């Protein structure tokens, strides 16, 4: 979708990608300046039981508390592309990116959600998913895909098929970790999306170990994580249809599941773009991307590091 000012290409890997990013241009700002300021309004959780409020920037059918939806980290390559007013490329792999059945609508849903969140930015989603692909297979294909697409962002929905194939847990974690490191070494951002939730495997120790390994790799490598498993479990527990609310046969997301995934991924990307950059020195000139917190958020200045100790990185 070609829009007037900035061109952005997102490449997602895995089963699904979601999220919502709000943006606007302030009056008097120089043309070309991009302002990212996502909404943070929240509504009480369904049932009024005093539990954590849900994120109302999401569609009513997709609303999940932030703690059950994502962990955040910097997206330096995407932010740099926005500053430089150049295309941002994104690559998607996983069964929801394979273009079969309802999954064929996933790239469009993701692209729409991202473009709605990033005004005046052209987002092109390149889908290269394969049905049933496991992490090691994706890793082998990734090198040629990266050379061809030259992405700024890889969104990797990973782990579901590894779990169903009963891949060795340590081998899975090693393949995922090494591939994320390789992607980062080429100055490409990564967003991981963990496995789908299904009640039939909710008590399966092996399946849950795969879910945990994805989270561990995301934390260790400092990349954003969309907690699809927790989000789907939450939504299943608040729907009369249970997991059928989002999940069809053979562990495939239905149309609503794909739309919610697109929103969830977009939301994680939006908030990750608000993560502070490392302290820079010797820079000059005004930035072309202004990352502004929502009006209802109080921004506290960072505390100075204690003498004799290393700075502590803030956790989302």
Image: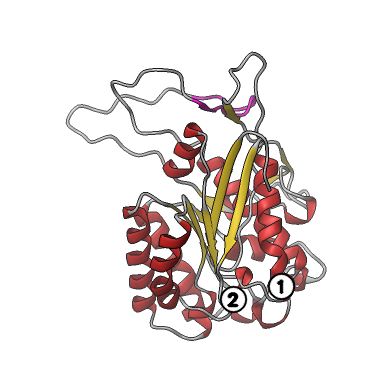
Predominant secondary structure, magenta span: loop
Q: Is residue 184 left or right of residue 97?
A: left
Q: Can residue 112 be seen from the camera position used here?
A: yes
Color style of the picture: secondary structure
Foreground disc of the pair 2, 1 = 1
Furthest residue in direction bottom, as rendered? 165
Residue at far left of view: 308
Label 1 residue SS: loop
Q: Is residue 211 above or below residue 268?
A: below
Q: Which residues are magenta?
A: 288-299
* Residue at image coords 39%, 74%: 140
Which residue corresponds to the image point at 49% horizontal and 86% vertical from the top-left? 165
Mark 1 neighbour class, 10 Å CA radius: few under 14, some 14 to 19, many 20 or more: many
Does 291 lie within the magenta span?
A: yes
- Of 304 and 31, which appears nearest the observer? 31
Q: Choose between 98 and 51: the one closer to the eye.
A: 98
Q: Is residue 229 magenta?
A: no
x and y percent of residue 47 in the render?
79, 53
Outermost residue toward the top? 28
x then y, percent, for residue 275: 47, 37
Q: Is residue 155 left or right of residue 260?
A: left
Question: 120 left or right of 189?
Answer: right
Q: CA distance from mark 2 to mark 1?
A: 14 Å
The residue that label 2 is drawn on is 202
Query: Which callout, 2 or 1, points at the residue further toward the start of the chain?
Result: 2
Q: Which mark is residue 247?
A: 1
Task: Tell me if mark 2 has few (under 14), some (14-19) or many (20+) residues whose alpha carbon lies within 10 angstroms of its own.
Answer: few
Query: Who's the residue at 56% across and 59% down the image?
Result: 227
Tell whether 9 sits left or right of 119.
left
């Amino acid at each position: 979708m070609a829009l007037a000012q900035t061109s952005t290409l997102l490449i997602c890997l895995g089963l699904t990608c979601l999220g919502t990013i709000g943006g606007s241009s302030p009056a008097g700002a120089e043309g070309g300046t991009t302002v990212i300021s996502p909404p943070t309004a929240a509504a009480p959780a369904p049932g009024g039981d005093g539990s954590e409020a849900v994120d109302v920037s999401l569609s009513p059918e997709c609303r999940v508390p932030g703690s059950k939806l994502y962990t955040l980290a910097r997206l330096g390559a995407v932010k740099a592309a926005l500053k430089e007013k150049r295309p941002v490329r994104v690559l998607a792999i996983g069964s929801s990116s394979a273009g079969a059945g309802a999954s064929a609508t996933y790239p469009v849903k993701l692209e729409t959600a991202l473009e709605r969140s990033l005004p005046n930015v052209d987002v092109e989603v390149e889908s290269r998913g394969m049905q049933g692909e496991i992490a090691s297979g994706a890793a082998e294909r990734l090198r040629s895909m990266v050379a061809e697409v030259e992405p700024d962002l890889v969104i990797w929905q990973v782990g579901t098929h590894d779990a169903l194939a009963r891949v060795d847990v340590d081998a899975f974690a090693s393949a995922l970790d090494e591939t994320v490191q390789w992607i980062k070494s080429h100055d490409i951002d990564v967003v991981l999306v963990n496995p789908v939730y299904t009640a039939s495997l909710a008590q399966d120790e092996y399946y849950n170990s795969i879910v945990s390994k994805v989270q561990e790799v995301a934390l260790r490598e400092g990349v954003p994580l969309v907690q699809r498993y927790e989000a789907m479990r939450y939504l299943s527990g608040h729907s009369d249809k249970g997991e059928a609310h989002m999940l069809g046969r053979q562990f495939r997301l239905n149309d609503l599941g794909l739309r919610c995934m697109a929103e969830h991924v977009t939301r994680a990307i939006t908030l990750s773009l608000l993560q502070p950059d490392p302290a820079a020195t010797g820079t000059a000139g005004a930035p072309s991307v202004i990352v502004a917190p929502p009006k209802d958020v109080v921004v506290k200045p960072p505390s100075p590091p204690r003498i004799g100790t290393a700075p502590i990185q803030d956790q989302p």
